[in-house]
Structures are given as C-alpha cells and as structure tokens.
Image: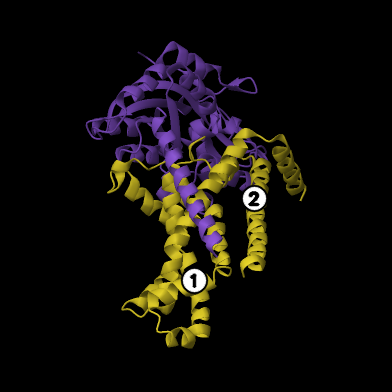
Chain colours: A purple, B yellow
Amino acid sequence: MKSIDKIRRHLIAATATAALLSAGAQAQERFITVASTTSTEQSGLFGHLLPAFEKAAGIKVRVVALGTGQALDLARRGDADVVFVHDKVAEEKFVADGWGIKRQEVMYNDFILVGPRADPAKAAGKDILEGLHKIEAAKAPFVSRGDKSGTHAAELRYWKAAGVDLDARKGPWYRDTGSGMGPALNTAASMNAYILADRGTWLNFKNRGELGIVVEGDTRLFNQYGVILVNPAKHAHVKQADGQKFIDWLVSPAGQKAIADYKIGGEQLFFPNATK
Amino acid sequence: MNEISASLGLAGELIAAGDARLAAIVGLSLRVSLTATLLSCVLGMPLGALLSVGRFPGRRTLIVLTNGFMGLPPVVVGLIVYLLLSRAGPLGSFGLLFTPAAMIVAQTVLITPIIAALTRQVIEDEWREYREQLRSLGARRVRVARTLLWNARFSLTTAALAGFGRAIAEVGAVMIVGGNIDGVTRVMTTTIALETSKGDLPLALALGAILIGVVLAINTGAYLFKQWAERRWG
C-alpha cells in the first residue's frame, strides 16, 4: 500500500516537473505567431519558406492556418503578431479600422475553376464568369467553401460579376460546405462537382478523383496575398520587432526568391510581387 | 478495401522508418492526453466519491450535470477555452493560447465529468456494500469517501482509461486552442485532419492506424499493470 502511494507521488512529481521544464523551454524560444490561410499551409509553401527565414533570423514562426476571415478575427483578438492572407478588401478594412499597421503585398497565385473532366455544364474555357453562368444554367453541382475565407469571398464576387443572384438562384445544386479548401475539394471529388480553388492547394491535393481544371488563365482569377503587422497600440504584447523582421524578409529579395523557388512537379505555385 | 490495406502497409513503413517527426507528434499526443487524464483523476475522482457518499444541497443537480457533461461537444469546450485564453479574454495575459498547456486545459475540462461520473458509479456500489460497516465505525463522510476510493482503486482504472480514450481521440478542442502549429501543438488527431484536408487519405488512415495502436498499447499496459497490482496488493 505504502509503495503504491510512493509510486503515485513520484509520478505526480515527475509529471509536474516535466510540465514545468517544457514550459520553460518554450518560454526561451524566440517565436512569432502568424495567422494565415489554409491555402498557404496546405499547399506546402510554409514548409518550404519558414525554415529559410528561421535560419536567417533565428526566429521561429508558428503558423495557425485558418480561412482569411477567421485569421483576421484571430488577429483582432490579439492572438497573432502577423496576418498573411488573401482578401484585399477585408485586409484594407482591417488596417483602416486600426487593427493592423500597414498592408504590404507579397505574392500572388491564381484561382482556378475545377470540375469533372467530362465537363457536363460545358463550362471550360478562359472566361470565369461565362463558366459560372453555364454551371448555374445547367444546375450542375457546385461546391462552395462557405467559410468567409479569401477564396469564398472571391467566389461570391465572381458570381456577382457574372450577374447570378445566388440568393435567388441557389438550389440543391449549390452546396455550401463551410469548410477549408482541402475538405471542400474532398467533397467536390466525391460528388464530382465544380469548385473554385486556389492553384496551390490544387497542385498539392492528392484525392482528385475525376476532377480536373476547367477554367484558368482569366486575369480576373488573380489572387493577391498581403501581409500585415498587428497594431501594438491595440495589443501591447504584439511582438512588433520580430513580426516586422518577418515581413521585411518576405518582401526582401531573399524572401521573394524563396517564394519563387517553391515548386511542385516543376510548377511554380506562388509568384512574388512585393513593391517596396 | 485496397486503400485500407495499403494504408496499413504505409503505417508499418512509417513505424519501421522511426521517423523523428512522427515520434514527436505521438509523444506530444501522449504528453497532453496523459497529463489531462492525471489532472482529471485528481479533480474528478474525489468529486465522484463525494457525490456518491456526500449529503449536501445541490448534490443531485451536480450528479445530473456530471452525467450530462460526459457528452460535452469537444468543439464547444475548445471554443470556450479559446475565448478564456485568448489575449482579449480574461486569462489572456498568461499567453497560454496555442501551447500544449492550453490543450491540456481543454482536454481536462472535457474528461473530468467522464471520470467523475464513472467514479461516482463505482463508489456508489462500494458504498452500498460497506455502508453499515463504515457507519458502525462512525467514520465521517470525507473519510469514508477516501476509504472507498482506495478500496475501489483497481476498478477506477477503467474510469481513468475512459477519460484518456476520449482525450487522445478528440480533435475539435485541441484544433481550436492548439492551432495545429507544426512542431508545437500538432498532435495525432490534428495531423490526421490536416492530411485528410490535403486529400492524402492513405497517409491520414495510416496515421489513424498508428493512433489506434498507441491507444491499444496503453490499454494493454494498464490492464497488465492492474492484474499484477491486484495479485501483489489486492
């Protein structure tokens, strides 16, 4: 009986010590928290980019990958030092409202319309608006992110520009999934549906089923990424110096080259276009 | 079927390769969930014992609450803990969000009701059996609760294992409060969710097989230890 008590006491002491030790180790590590999008994480860009920055600056970057809307929300609550997202309208509002200091453009990639290779709606071509029109006319299944992400915001803009009033035309053909890019692609693959995706996630996506690219190359499909330092005046604990270092590195020649160097199967995913 | 057998093969390869990153992820999963289980036992077992032998106002309400909270949705627990630990929240100044500590807190909240409710059931049965005996000794309720907990220690491993099983298997809470940060808060379940997102279903399933294997190993270990301890001290 006594020895069990002893063992137990040792166990508790050991766990407490381990917890304290690991907490100590974490406190010593120099890091910033970046709220970013599922597209940058799931495309594998960060896995390629961050080690280069960490080596150059000695600062670890902890990425929390969410939809753009959620990422900005997280930053508004003060839970991130830097946001790295792709919804220019929302980003500019974020800065105008005083939550961020300054928005800087970093890189772009493009959206693509993915759909069944057999293309039952005959949506294929170089015109995204025409493509969406045909999908709506054919009532072909379409999967929407529906999660206030940058891609979702872009999709809604395209429907509007195409003159399709979704609220009125929405039917069983339009599937609002409320999920990230990958899960939405999984849904589209299993339903053989059309979906708007960012090229990066698509290139890195493995469960494609019968899906292929239906529309690409339309200049309207341009997808700009911006980076913003969270305003320390709103949240005093924001790591301003280290966060700024990360931003400066992203837009520097070294950072821009690292972005251009990321390729999957020989194909470049993101195109640096920072303007100093 | 083909995919599943391919995944099992992949799981075997991953284990055989002894990948350091995979080991770190499994290690973090175990560290977080075992710590949460330990904390929940410390909190939940005395609570469960008091609920079964105690006589105090609000006892029945507490019993219903612990029973009901066994079904707490992990994503809701995650959200509440997130709002508490967020910089804009009441406990934000500790800077615990997106750390393993935050994940431990969330899982502790999630499984303490499970351990408390199961403990209450076990102790209630013990209480019925030894009631007269303990009464005749004139023992106080707190003392009785302690004695019964000690008597039932072997049966209580099941309560602890049920809590642990729930903790290590959940993804909703740790995803929100941990943020699934590579190398910091990425555990088995969030990795599986991420690989599913990437459409790499074979890898996701292989990781799932490894997770189930780890849970089975822990349960086997606990079972053998219990048997050995029962023979030795029982």
Residue at 63 percent of width and 64 percent of height: B229
Of helix, strand and loop, which one carries label 1?
Answer: helix
Depth order, front residue of A66/B174: B174
Q: Is residue A95 visible?
A: yes
* Image coordinates for residue A85, horizontal then vertical, percent: 41, 31
Residue pointed to by mark 1: B149
Depth order, front residue of A130/B7: B7
- Dot 1 amino acid type: Leu
Q: Is residue B191 visible?
A: no
In the rendered image, which quarter is residue B52 located in? bottom left
Residue pointed to by mark 2: B214
Residue at 50 percent of width and 25 percent of height: A218
Residue at 41 percent of width and 17 percent of height: A249
Give how far apart the Cα atoms at labels 2 and 1 are: 28 Å
Alpha-carbon neighbours of circle 1 within 10 Å: few (<14), some, or many (≥20)?
many
Residue at 50 percent of width and 42 percent of height: A180
Above/below status of B64 relative to A167: below
Residue B216 vs residue A244: left or right? right
Which residue is the extreme one toward the front? A2
- Dot 2 amino acid type: Val
Alpha-carbon neighbours of circle 2 within 10 Å: few (<14), some, or many (≥20)?
some
Of helix, strand and loop, which one carries label 2?
Answer: helix
Residue A132 vs residue B226: left or right? left
Image quarter of the N terminus of chain A: bottom right
The nearer-to-camera label among 2 and 1 is 1
* Image coordinates for residue A138, horizontal then vertical, percent: 56, 45
Depth order, front residue of B147/A215: B147
Above/below status of A271 relative to A3: above
What's the chain of the residue with tag 1?
Answer: B
* Image coordinates for residue B207, horizontal then vertical, percent: 64, 44
Image quarter of the C terminus of chain A: top left
